[in-house]
Amino acid sequence: MSCTVRADGVSVELDGHRILHEVDLAVEPGELVVLVGPNGAGKSTLLAALAGDLPLAAGRVSLNGLDVTKHRVADLGRLRAVLMQKQTLAFGFRAEAVVEMGRSPWHRTPRAADDERVVRRSMERADVLALAERVFSTLSGGEQARVAFARLLAQEVPVLFLDEPTAALDVRHQEAVLDVAQACARAGSAVVVVLHDLSLAAAYADRICILAAGRVCADGPPRSVLDAALLSEVYGHPLDVAEVSGQLVVVPVRRRAALSNVKNSEECA
């Protein structure tokens, strides 16, 4: 099953503050779209709105043409999976049990027969099989993030929403998680990922959507939107975009910092 995600004129208010302003975004099956932007740009808010987890002040979010608010809760669980930034569990579940939770939308359906195979395969893909018997709360932040990613994979749905899935991970696992997310897109899923690392976004995104102050500044393939002047303006810091081994790399310009360090050293001497 495939599913298209659309946001049309979406605005969101939280605590009386307008966080998103008339955002339009479409994600087709087979696409991996990365949301980037500075802190407070509205990336996580947009992801939550797309998932149907936030009320809208204006506009519409649809999955396969049907307003997300019109889907039954059970149906939403069979359409989209969400990986949040922070993982919180109140009880001492083993890691394997946490991954098994991803299968709950398929309880008492024919697909439940695949639970054991899917859970094991998902744990393999997230590199957490060795953690199966560990209590979730005793795991490191990165290990918890990977177990949560395995749970998302185990849900086996056509739309994946991932909020900063690489934030707590080492380089190897950052690459591994995004490689799996990209593979899901290639297999027909619609995948939306929030990232802070612009170089990772450039490496894995089919499209990058740049947000600033709750508005879309640019949306397109990495090479068309990762412009040094635009990024410097959006982030309020000079940035360079270079190509290394055929890959786009975004790096901060640190000349000002270097001059500042020299000045500070002179003052401390």
Image: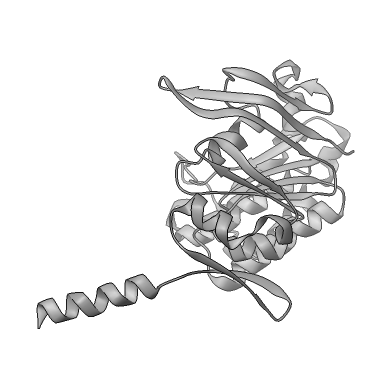
Counting from the top left corner in percent of width and height, residue 257 is at 33, 71
Residue 97 seen from this side: no
Q: Position of residue 32 (x, y in %)?
A: 75, 51
Task: Tell me what residue is drawn at x 45 percent, y 41 percent.
Answer: 40
Residue 2 to residue 130: above or below: above
Q: Residue 17, can we see it?
A: yes
Q: On the rendered structure, is 253 left or right of 73?
A: left
Q: Quadrant of the C terminus?
A: bottom left
The chosen color scheme is one colour
Q: Position of residue 265 (x, y in %)?
A: 18, 80
Residue beneath the point at 50% across and 41% down: 41
Judging depth in this view, the residue of 54 and 76 nearest the camera is: 54
Q: Is residue 206 left or right of residue 59?
A: right
Q: Say above or below: 90 vs 206.
A: above
**Could you tell me residue 267's position as x and y percent?**
11, 76
The quarter of the picture where residue 245 lies is bottom right
Q: Is residue 113 above or below residue 56?
A: below
The front one of 46 and 133 is 46
Q: Is residue 235 above or below residue 268?
A: above
Name the foreground residue: 155 vs 81: 81
Image quarter where the N terminus lies is: top right
Give the image quarter of residue 83: top right
Q: How many marks?
A: 0
The residue depicted at 67 percent of the width and 62 percent of the height is: 202
Q: Is residue 250 left or right of residue 126?
A: left
Q: Residue at (40%, 72%) from the top-left corner? A: 254
